Image: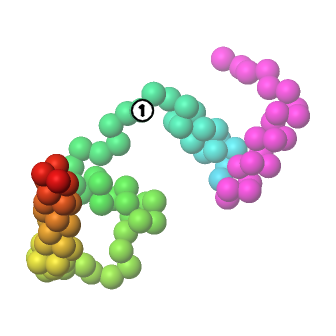
Amino acid sequence: MALDIPAELTQRLEEAAEARGLSAGDYLEDLLDAAAPPKKQWATLADLARHAKEAGMASGHPVDTSARSREILNTEFADYLKSRIDRRLSSSIAVFY
């Protein structure tokens, strides 16, 4: 199947692809993928990690997840729970006045 694409549109496609460091075909494929209905992009944690690395979202250094989780539970989460309790107590006290 042949497509009749106007020269002006072809020029725009090539310029946009070049600006992103892609071939016109790769850029067009990316555009079509973005316009397609959402599809499941990963099925496992390994897939999620691979996508994060490809998107430049991966950490540049090793992360000790268990230690960081304990730190969050012992500090930030405790503070969050305390603030929720304080808010509930404040609203309960306000009802009695």
Question: Is residue 3 left or right of 91 when viewed as pictured?
Answer: right
Q: Is residue 71 visible?
A: yes
Q: Which residues are drawn in magenta? A: 1-21
Q: Nearer the viewer, residue 60 or 86?
A: 86
x 36%, y 74%: residue: 59
Question: Judging from the image, what secondary structure is the residue with disc 1 in?
Answer: loop
Q: Is residue 22 above or below residue 9?
A: below
State the colouring used for the structure image: rainbow
The quadrant in which residue 73 appears is: bottom left
| Residue in the image at 69% along x and 44% along y | 24
Determine the residue positioned at 64% across, 44% down. Answer: 27
Quadrant for the N terminus, please: top right
The answer to whether 59 is drawn above or below residue 20 in the figure is below
Residue at image position (33%, 82%) is 61
Q: Nearer the viewer, residue 46 or 3?
A: 46
Q: How many marks?
A: 1
Chief SS of the magenta region: helix
Q: Which residue is mark 1?
A: 38
Crowdedness near tag 1: few (<14), some (14–19) or many (≥20) residues, C-alpha within 10 Å:
few
Residue 48 vertical placement versus 53 (above, below): above
Measured along the vertical axis of the image, is residue 97 above or below residue 31?
below
Place of residue 34 in the rendered image (x, y in percent of width and height, measured from the top left): 53, 37
Rendering coords of residue 30 (x, y %): 57, 42
Q: Is residue 58 left or right of residue 80?
A: right
Q: Nearer the viewer, residue 76 or 88?
A: 88
| Three-letter code, disc 1 | Pro
Q: Splitting the image into 4 quarters, where does residue 60 fall?
A: bottom left
Question: Which residue is the extreme one toward the front?
Answer: 97
Can residue 77 be seen in this snapshot?
Answer: no
Is residue 79 magenta-colored? no
Q: Position of residue 48 (x, y in %)?
A: 29, 54
